Amino acid sequence: MTRLSRKLFIVGASIFLLIMASAASSQELKWVNSNNESCYITCDRQEMKPVASGEYTNGKPYYVCAAEVGGTMQGYRPGYNLSPKWDNVCTVGYGGNERMIHRYKCLCVK
């Protein structure tokens, strides 16, 4: 399994587990459209917090996001939003590469 595949598997598994856990909890998860800004800012504007799926080597969290890649018929793919350099994109795996997408949604929790 490549490093990229591992990252994407972890993000996808994290999203699945969070969604399943939310059904049994009082926390509300919501996908919020981002305007080319970090998931932290996007969620904060909704009086929510971004969902993190782990930490990068610099200690910054990977925030869970989703973006459409490869046309509208492909649907949304899970990805990550990472500060400080890549906080205005959602990085998703597609075609064996990472793609940085500027139109994306952030997963926020109340």
Image (cartoon, rainbow, N blue to C red):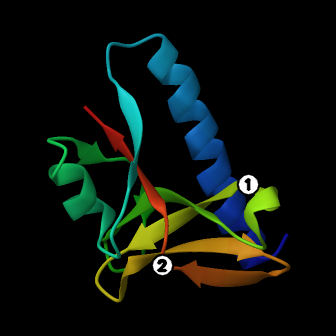
The residue carrying mark 2 is 102
Q: Which label belongs to residue 97?
A: none
The residue carrying mark 1 is 75
Q: Judge whether 81 appears above or below 87 on screen.
A: above
Residue at 50% in and 66% down:
80
Determine whether the residue tagged by mark 2 lies in a helix, strand or loop: loop
Q: Quadrant of residue 36?
A: bottom left
Q: How crowded is mark 1: few (under 14 residues within 10 Å), some or many (20 or more)?
A: few
As shown in the figure, which amino acid type bears the numbered disc 1?
Gly
Determine whether the residue tagged by mark 1 lies in a helix, strand or loop: loop
| Image location (x, y in percent) of residue 89 | 45, 78
Residue at 85% in and 78% down:
95
Q: In which quarter of the image is residue 75?
A: bottom right
Q: Judge whether 95 appears above or below 33 on screen.
A: below
| Image location (x, y in percent) of residue 27 | 32, 22
Q: Earlier in the sequence, mark 2 or mark 1?
A: 1
Q: Which of 108 and 61 is in front in this view?
A: 108
Image quadrant in which the C terminus is located: top left
As shown in the figure, which amino acid type bears the numbered disc 2?
His
Instruction: State the separation of the CA atoms marked 2 and 1.
Output: 15 Å
Q: In this view, does 110 lie to the left or right of 67?
A: left
